Image (cartoon, helix red, strand yellow):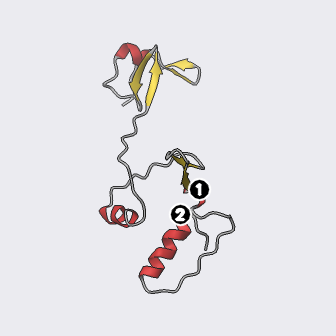
Amino acid sequence: MGAGLTGSTIARCLADAGREVLVLERRSEVGGNVRDSRHESGVRIGHHGPHYFRCSSLRIWDFANRFAEFRPVQPRILALVDGTYEDWPITSEMSPASAASISFNGGTNSGRANS
């Protein structure tokens, strides 16, 4: 199996269960698409873009924290509406004037906020 996220996870679980595992990776680095490295400046660089690890399972969270240090992240997606940043997805808490001005597929939202 490869040494990307899935292959590494399966290999670890099998090894934890007492199985003998051989991991083969065709790339010159392990980690697959979640591979990162630390730049000489100390900044961590994700070679395939940033990844957010979100999990509601304590069992999975504890497993993942055996192998990596995670920093708390609270991602917030905003939409620029008439020069004002609004939370996305748009909900009924958005001002009616802002909701009415949003364009969907070239049309308007006819003043209705999505909930």
- Name the spot of residue 21 as percent of width and height, x first: 54, 82
Q: Is residue 22 above or below residue 58?
A: below
> Could you tell me which secondary element the residue under label 2 belongs to?
helix
- Name the spot of residue 22 as percent of width and height, x first: 58, 81
Q: Residue at x 56, y 46 (%)?
A: 49
Q: What numbered label is drawn on residue 5? A: 2
Q: Are marks 1 and 2 in contact (CB under 8 Å)?
A: yes
51 left or right of 64 in image: right
Q: Amino acid at mark 1?
A: Asn
If you read the primary sequence from the N terminus, does the residue marked by circle 1 or circle 2 appear first?
Answer: 2
Residue 111 visible? The answer is: no
Residue 62 visible? The answer is: yes
Q: Residue at x 39, y 52 (%)?
A: 54
Q: Quadrant of residue 24?
A: bottom right
Q: Residue at x 53, y 66 (%)?
A: 6
Q: What whole-number distance in Å separates the C-alpha atoms at marks 1 and 2?
A: 8 Å
Quarter placement of the C terminus: top left
Q: Quadrant of residue 106?
A: top right
Which one is in front, 43 or 102? 43
Quarter placement of the N terminus: bottom right
Q: What numbered label is drawn on residue 115? A: none
**Other residues around mark 1 within 10 Å, as few (<14) / some (14–19) / many (≥20):** few
Q: Is residue 64 above or below residue 89?
A: below
- Name the spot of residue 12 as percent of width and height, x first: 47, 75
Which one is in front, 102 or 26? 26
Q: Residue at x 43, y 16 (%)?
A: 100
> Could you tell me which secondary element the residue under label 1 belongs to?
helix
Q: Amino acid at mark 2?
A: Leu
User: What residue is disc 1 on?
Assistant: 33
Which one is in front, 39 or 2? 39
